[in-house]
Amino acid sequence: MDIRSTFGSYLKASDVADRPARLTIKNCVMEKVGQESSQEMKAVLYFEGTEKGLVLNKINSNTIGDAYGFETNSWGGCRVELYHDFTEFAGKRVECIRVRTPSVQVNAPAPPPQAPPQHGPPADYQSPEFNAPQGGDEVPF
């Protein structure tokens, strides 16, 4: 058991330190977050199949909003990937969780290579004007 996983009901950077987690959003709710003496209302994202929520910051909120719209009621069922990163807080470099939208499926087959488009005549085409004698090295145009 990782002792860090026993504290708090919200996700921490250590929860995704080993590898990114692809999750499906269940909902987003406003909750009181923080110490009892200094609690603030914050948006918390919950995921299908997990108990801990992710307290959203502005960067992660905007990332999800850019991908799925800024109405949180429409985020249910949307896929996101949580990953470990670093940020500056109070003048120090600290661990954090970042959100991104999955761009490709893991283990998805690569698309077949496409032949480049053909421009001009085929490679073996011989222009009669090019091969005709021109009377010296002058360019005809």
Image (tube, helix red, strand yellow):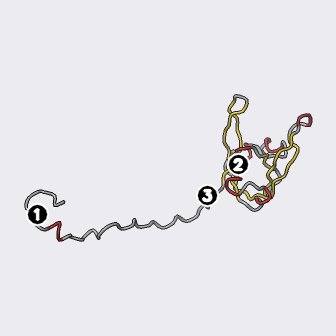
Residue 134: which numbered mark, if any?
1
Give the number of the mark in front: 1 or 3: 1
Mark positioned earlier in the residue sequence (1 or 2): 2
> In the rendered image of this protein, does residue 78 appear above or below residue 32?
below
Residue type, numbered disc 2: Asn
**Occupied quadrant, residue 39:** top right
Give the number of the mark in front: 2 or 3: 2
The alpha-carbon separation of the residues under discs 1 and 3 comes to 57 Å
For the C terminus, give its image quadrant: bottom left
The residue under the point 86% across, 39% down is 34
For the view shown, which residue lies furthest in the top direction? 91
Q: Element at badge 1?
A: loop
Give the number of the mark in front: 1 or 2: 1
The residue under the point 68% across, 32% down is 93
Q: Element at badge 3?
A: loop
Residue 80 x %, y %: 70, 55
Residue type, numbered disc 3: Ser
Mark positioned earlier in the residue sequence (2 or 3): 2
Residue 62: which numbered mark, if any?
2
Residue 100: which numbered mark, if any?
none
Residue 11 x %, y %: 78, 46
Residue hosting label 3: 103
Mark 1 burial class by Cα count in 10 Å: few <14, some 14-19, many 20+: few
**Occupied quadrant, residue 116:** bottom left
Mark 2 burial class by Cα count in 10 Å: few <14, some 14-19, many 20+: some
Residue 7 x %, y %: 84, 42
Left/right placement of residue 36 relative to residue 130 reads: right
Left/right placement of residue 40 relative to residue 80 reads: right
The alpha-carbon separation of the residues under discs 1 and 2 comes to 66 Å
